[in-house]
Amino acid sequence: MDIRWEENNLLSIREHAYLFLKEMILEGELKAGDRLIERELAGKLNISRTPIREALFRLESQGFVKTVPRKGVVVSNISESEVIEVFTILASLEVLAVKLAAQRMDQETQLELEQKIQELLALEKQSEEDFNLEHIQMNRLINKASKSPKLFEILSGLIDYIHMAANMGYETPGRRKESLREHIDIMKALRDKETELAEYLMRIHIENSKKAYINYIKNIKEKMNRKDKVKST
């Protein structure tokens, strides 16, 4: 990857470095236990070490990385129980968000939803990989439609966990397109102000996402167990 950032705006460089590293963690390019060496990262991004150091400090404060004695900064292992807890929270908060969105639906939001629905219907025919870019945008649009600033703020605070868990769940064959279709159906129900249907579809979506994540973790554990058995023979 050829990255060229101008260091004429230090605040911008800091934010770019932070977002770049966080995205690599969320997308699984940087895995739990991987070392994050300031010098190497600065060289990769063609910037000085100061923005990298500040980005790592910020990521550590959010629990994405941690400092390990004699090893330095490494990617944290966010536990399975933490992610399951997030799904439990979402089962209440995102269902509430769609309920409020359907009840408070106005013409402007209906037009926004219709535009996004058409974009997603076109995306449905393309590569599954293209869906990754849309996932966060869809969630933000649905949550914003609730017209509850505090609820939107709370859900925005969970968006990184949602993104990470979703990406893991997408390892299940066909899950990306299944999730895309679920979002389209939810937005159609919201557009048409079908409150109960929107709540039901959101519950199904969260449950399917949780199952896909659990399936991913199960497969990872099975692979690790097979490797351990091979080593012991």
Image: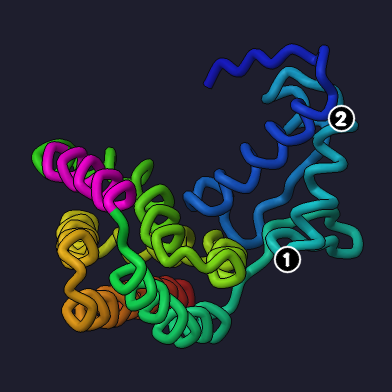
Q: Is 115 inside the magenta-drawn segment?
A: yes
Name the side, left or right, on which 145 lies relative to 68. Answer: left
Disc on res. 183: none
Q: Residue 172, relative to residue 114: is it above or below?
A: below
Residue 74 visible in the snapshot: yes
Q: Name the residue at the front extreme.
A: 107
Q: Position of residue 88 (x, y in %)?
A: 45, 87
Q: Residue at x 40, y 80 (%)?
A: 96
Disc on res. 49: 2
> Mark 1 highlights which residue?
63
Magenta residues span 107-122
Q: In the rendered image, which quarter is residue 192 located in? A: bottom left
Q: Residue at x 82, y 29 (%)?
A: 11
Q: Quadrant of the C terminus?
A: bottom left
Q: Does the residue at mark 2 contact the one at mark 1 (Cβ under 8 Å)?
A: no
Q: Amino acid at mark 1?
A: Gly
Q: Amino acid at mark 2?
A: Arg
In this picture the colour scheme is rainbow
Tag 1 secondary structure: loop
Q: Residue 32, relative to residue 121: is it above or below?
A: below
Q: Position of residue 159 (x, y in %)?
A: 52, 61
Q: In the rendered image, which quarter is residue 44 located in? A: top right
Q: Position of residue 65 (x, y in %)?
A: 73, 59
Specify few, some or many for label 1: CA neighbours under 10 Å numbering under 14, 14-19, or 20 or more. Answer: few
Q: Position of residue 12 (x, y in %)?
A: 75, 27
